[in-house]
Image (cartoon, grey):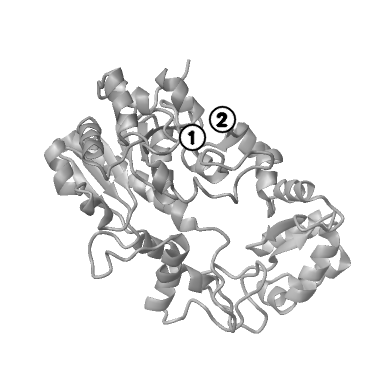
Amino acid sequence: MALPGALAGIRVLDFTWVRAGPWATRMLGSLGAEIIKVEWPENLDMIRRGTATVPEGVEEGPNSAGLFADSNANKLGITLNIRSESGLDLVRDLIAVSDIVMENFSSRVMQRRGLGYEELRKLKPDIIYVSMAGFGHTGRHHSYTTMGPSAQALSGLTFLSGVPDAPPAGWGYSYLDDTGGMYGAMCALTALRHRTVTGQGQHVDLSQMTMGITLTGAAFLDRTVNGRESRREGYPPGNRTVWPGAPLENSYRGPAAVPHNAYRTRGGGHNDWCVIACFSDEEWEELVRVMGSPQWATDADLSGLPGRIRRQDDIDQNIEVWTQTLEKYELAAMCQDTGVRAMPVQSSQDRVENDPQLRERGMFMEFDHAVLGRREYQSVPFKLSKTSAEVRGPAPLIGQHTREVMEGLLGLSRQEVLDGYDDGTLWPADMPRHLYIEEALK
């Protein structure tokens, strides 16, 4: 028997787009909330119309983008023209029967539509309104627009990723989007708890850029307490914690440790690597035993951290001679069995197909999508013993559930729904409708 979701009975009206906002509502959906995603075909979410993530062999279109499908699982999808008075009336009706409204536009967008928090309170006094603007809804820059990478740059994270005498590196993915989504879900849950206790709703004002500053971690303290910059000469390459000749001091990167690097493994391909880290002399001694106690590793000079730092190049080169004789998963298992911290470097394919731990924890779930076919979706990274937390279904096709929501939730008649399609309220009047919409209207 399936466990109920902790948020069963909670309805979220979802005006979000791109990744941060949709990730927040996806998480709430994983906890059992009903998510109604509002879209409009003439102003598609950029990741719904994006072609970079359309799987090979799938025809490009608004329902075929993989990133959109990943970001919007667990949701119902409706189309509604909120630029029209009739569309706004229906939005107001939906707000009146919802618990949470969530959006991640810049601060003025919803206000211009007459859908700011003060207007929402008139429709439903205990509504929870979660806004996730890049700069929040207050401060001199609140109206600025941003995306994950630009918020990342302003927060300081891009600077942290750079190396001396080179351009700022940035990150390979916009982590602020997914992290922002988790913060958004956390704030929504906090507001729900407050409403349960007091009966009052509230406006949650989340700034994606400000949230990014919390991710700089100890680098902030390194500057304010120690007076050290977060980027310094001798910044270690690869995965090292310290570079020979650099001061032996703990920094925001953590304690100095040698060996601490990524090493090539058998196969020598671009994805054949394993990370090994020894944070104590005892862990180093265990690694030496795992390697078969080669003569070079038993040198007394390497028994302590200062000696290993001085000879870090030699250590890394010799370790890699050994690691290249082993497959990366085999190597990691050998090290872990003796308490040495080692993990294979995994690609996306590795995580989905080769990682038994993720598989056994149910991190990936298969669902049939009407356009993409049977695909795996990432689930949630935690387990709840008394309630379920999982992906319950694929992302909606655009406008897939409009009739269901309008008739089943708002009580519109069949003719009113048909009129809404004809007059441009529920679908652009001059745009052909998808076959599944026509089938739903029969």
How many residues crowd around disc 2 within 10 Å: few (fewer than 14), some, or many (20 or more)?
some
Amino acid type indicated by mark 2: His
Count of number-bearing discs: 2
Task: Determine whether label 2 and label 1 are within 8 Å by CB.
Answer: yes
Question: Can you tell which mark lies on residue 395?
Answer: 1
Q: Is residue 334 left or right of residue 98?
A: right
Q: Residue at x 49, y 56 (%)?
A: 175
Q: Secondary structure at mark 2?
A: strand
- Find residue 271 and report its image quarter: bottom right
Q: Is residue 382 left or right of residue 259?
A: left
One can see residue 349 in this view = yes
Q: Looking at the picture, tell me which residue is in the foreground, 120 or 311.
A: 120
Q: Position of residue 329 (x, y in %)?
A: 75, 47
Amino acid type indicated by mark 1: Ala
Q: How far apart are the two marked residues, 2 and 1, measured between alpha carbons?
A: 8 Å
Q: Looking at the picture, tell me which residue is in the foreground, 100 or 278.
A: 100
Question: Can you tell which mark lies on residue 70?
Answer: none
User: Looking at the rendering, in which quadrant would you find the C terminus?
Assistant: top left
Q: Looking at the picture, tell me which residue is in the foreground, 30 or 116.
A: 116
Q: Is residue 390 left or right of residue 244?
A: left
Q: Residue at x 47, y 68 (%)?
A: 157
- Find residue 324 and report its image quarter: bottom right
Outermost residue to the front: 430
One can see residue 125 in this view = no
Does residue 27 lie above or below 305 as drawn? above
Q: Which residue is mark 2?
A: 369
